[in-house]
Amino acid sequence: MRLGMALTVVGTLTAAGNAAASTLVYVCGRDLCTSDDRGRDREGLTRDGARVGGYSRPTIDRAGRRVAFKLGDPGRVFTADARARRRTRIAPVPDGPRDATQLDAAISPDGRRVAWVETRINVTFGGSDFRRYVAGARGESPRQVAANGGRPFVGWFDPLTIVREGPPAEVPPLRPDQSLCLPDSATATNGVCGHVIARDPARNLRHPSVSANRRFVVATAYAPPGDDDLSIDHTGATVLFNAVTGAVVRELTRRPRDSGPVFSPDGRSVAFERNGGIWRVRVGGGGATRIVRSGRQPAWGR
């Protein structure tokens, strides 16, 4: 091999070996931790979790620059830089009580918006509703984007569109929890379902994550626990769906105790929680590999 060719090969291998790893953010105990996508270089982002009520529901934008998370119970939603230092409290929306419970949080893929869920009293029918709201990443211009009576979870399809539980009926009939959809922009405040991006006539779906190219959705699928499923997330199988047709592509995992799947920034892998640790599986199929021994609720950015 000539010297020039040898140097080119060595340079290519060196560049590949030095490629920047992507970043995981997850719950560790009552705090937030971070590591690379193989569980190395683990570092605590927070240390006050036990004192302030615990951190949960972390999400990170695709570029790995901004996070959202919930603090305490009842929940309070925050956004922050990727080190969880420069924080902004996302106040409850003015149409409800100042101490309204916030149940879930999600930063948009571009980091410019945050979505969350709040409870409201339904003065017409009684009981409580779960309503989804969106604001700028620092809480500016909050607005309701999904209907009364929704479920207490929220996710993003693209930088402008959230994901919610599906319509109450299709052909064949499905329960609301057995599909995921995009709200119709013509019904912005109530967020009535438009396009269905995932459906499973036998199982409920929770904790959706959408690939960067928006062709696929991954979610936890599990046997319905009852008629009124108000869980934020749930354990079950990790299932890949075609976001165009809503059909199942494949089951990435079949264990009944997996939860919280999230796509890698390049869309080639999915991280999820299993037995108090974080695991990784390729979207194309294959066995899962544990990457974090002790961690929950993973989020994945660059």
Image: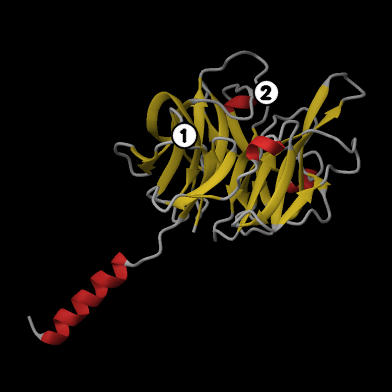
Q: Which of the 4 image quarters holds residue 96?
A: top right
> Where is residue 19 shown, x and y percent of the image?
36, 66
Looking at the image, tell me whether mark 1 or mark 2 is earlier in sequence order.
2
> Where is residue 140 shown, x and y percent of the image?
82, 56
Q: Which of the 4 image quarters holds residue 229?
A: top right
Residue 274 showing in the rendered view: yes
| Along the viewing direction, whichever of 175 and 288 lies nearer the viewer | 288
Tell me if residue 257 comes above or below residue 109 in the rendering: above
Looking at the rendered image, the quarter that the N terminus falls into is bottom left
Tell me if residue 176 comes above or below residue 197 in the rendering: above
Q: What's the residue at 48%, 37% (across, down)?
A: 295
> Where is residue 15 shown, x and y percent of the image?
31, 71
Does 232 sit left or right of 28 as displayed?
Answer: right
Label 2 is placed on what type of residue?
Leu
Does 60 sit left or right of 128 as displayed?
Answer: left
Residue 170 showing in the rendered view: no
**Cα distance in 3D space between marks 1 and 2:** 20 Å
Q: What's the residue at 59%, 41% (across, down)?
A: 31
> Where is residue 222 shown, x and y percent of the image?
50, 22
Residue that carries the numbered disc 2 in the rendered image: 230
Q: How many residues crowd mark 2 within 10 Å: few (<14), some (14–19), many (20+)?
A: some
